Image (spheres, grey):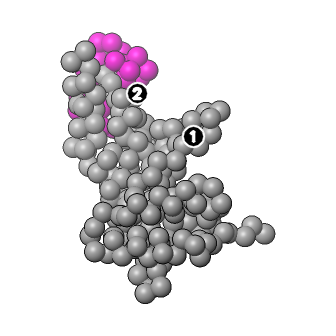
Amino acid sequence: MIIVPQLPEKLYKARDAVVESVHKGLEPPESLELIQEWLESDGWDALIGSMANETMAVDLNQFASYSFSDKEYIAGWLDEEQPITDEMRITHARMLISNASDGDDGYLVPSVYSFTIQSNNGKSAVVAATMRMMGQAGPETSWWGVYKTHMEFLEDLKKAGLVPVECIKDITDDEVLAYWKKKKARKSYK
């Protein structure tokens, strides 16, 4: 049986300050870094273990830069003479997105975690992170700060183009097409 480590008592003051700041709408105090450092070391099992909020997210910005291209679409799926419509782009992109987590190594589809902290007054918050696999270098943790809830964190991720897998179906056709066009716009400046 794995015992999930608990936040040490020496970090309670930092925890309370972090929770209070998020509930007052303030920037988190520097003491948030103490909690993050603990989570990356002694608290690792608390961050990624069964008590954590965990999901995966497709990095649509990165994914689109690799996969959303007329040239790639033609090379892998179509005849060079076949015209490509926006409807075809959307269908193809949705297929690629839905299959993304099946074979990805954890770079284009990072893991998403939030660790709940609760102060003595009963208020809680989540310390949020994403984790990409960097090949032989192992996981790379990116800290996203602190949020009132895990759902607020997921909303922030979506705004940044990291779409939680459970929200993939909610991406509109216009959003999918915007990622495809973003790719086309980047190429036209080169």
Magenta residue check for 79: yes
Residue plotted at (21% across, 43% down): 174
107 in relation to 3, above or below: above
Q: Is residue 161 visible?
A: yes
| Secondary structure of residue under mark 1 | strand
Q: Quadrant of the C terminus?
A: top left
Mark with earlier residue (1, 2): 2
Q: Within 10 angstroms of label 2, few (less than 14), some, or many (20 or more) residues?
A: few
Q: Is residue 53 visible?
A: no
Label 1 and label 2: CA atoms lie apart by: 17 Å
**Furthest-right residue in view?**
1
Q: Amino acid at mark 1?
A: Met
Q: Give the percent coordinates (x, y) of residue 16.
A: 44, 76
Name the residue that disc number 2 marks. 66
Q: Give the percent coordinates (x, y) of residue 129.
A: 47, 54
Residue plotted at (43% across, 87% down): 121
Q: Within 10 angstroms of label 1, few (less than 14), some, or many (20 or more) residues?
A: some
Q: Amino acid at mark 2?
A: Tyr
163 in relation to 135, above or below: below
Q: Is residue 186 toward the left or the right of residue 33 in the image?
A: left
Q: Which residues are magenta?
A: 71-92
Q: Is residue 108 toward the left or the right of residue 40 in the image?
A: left
Magenta residue check for 134: no
Residue plotted at (48% across, 75% down): 13
Residue plotted at (36% across, 53% down): 157
Q: Main secondary structure of the magenta part?
A: helix
Q: Quadrant of the N terminus?
A: bottom right
19 in relation to 29, above or below: below
Q: Is residue 184 toward the left or the right of residue 15 in the image?
A: left
- Pick the front one: 141 or 57: 141
Name the residue that disc number 1 marks. 133
